[in-house]
Image (cartoon, grey):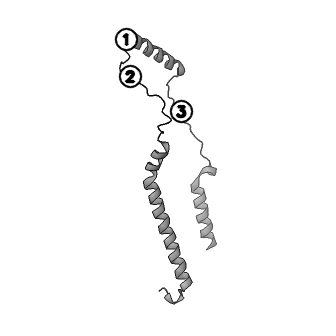
Amino acid sequence: MFDFSNITEEGLTIALVGYFIVFAALVLLFLVFNNLPRLLNFLLKPSKSKIVEKHEPIKKRLAISGEVNAAISTALILYFEELHDEEETILTINKVSKSYSPWNSKIYGTMGRMMLNHQKK
């Protein structure tokens, strides 16, 4: 059981101040993260003095003929095919047989320990 008689005024004051600091920090972090989008929008918004001229909206769409589209796509395909080397996709799996060695066998390690423990008794 916890003994409450050891609690002093100094200990109680330190605990309360600690709780208050942690709670105040959490409230401050909440306010900062809650208002961060508004603050960023305010800081990153371009001012009216920086915008000198307005661009007219593009009313006319550029029309590209089918032949031009075909030439562009053919050039892109030929360019991207040159980037990769031709590789053979032959997968070979060779079975490697390992000769048995007592050096890599775990059974001798456990059996040896069991034998040593049995002999000590």
Which badge, 3 or 1, comes first in the chain's sequence?
Answer: 1
Give the alpha-carbon distance from disc 2 to disc 3, as whole Å.
64 Å
**Residue highlighted by disc 1:** 65
Residue 60, percent from left and from top: 36, 18
Residue 75 in the image: above or below residue 21? above
Query: Foreground residue, 65 or 25?
Result: 25
Q: Name the residue nearer the viewer: 68 or 102.
A: 68
The residues tagged by marks 3 and 1 sit, at their Cα atoms, a distance apart of 55 Å
Please state the horizontal and vertical placement of residue 116, each as a whole percent of the image: 63, 66
Residue 7 position in % (x across, y down): 53, 86
Mark nearest the camera among 2 and 1 is: 2
Residue marked by disc 2: 58
Q: Residues within 10 Å of mark 1 (few under 14, many from 20)?
A: few
Which one is in front, 2 or 96? 2
At mark 3, the secondary structure is loop
Q: Amino acid at mark 3?
A: Asn
On the question of residue 3 being in view, the answer is no
Mark with earlier residue (2, 3): 2
Badge 1 amino acid: Ser
Residue 94 numbered mark, or none: 3
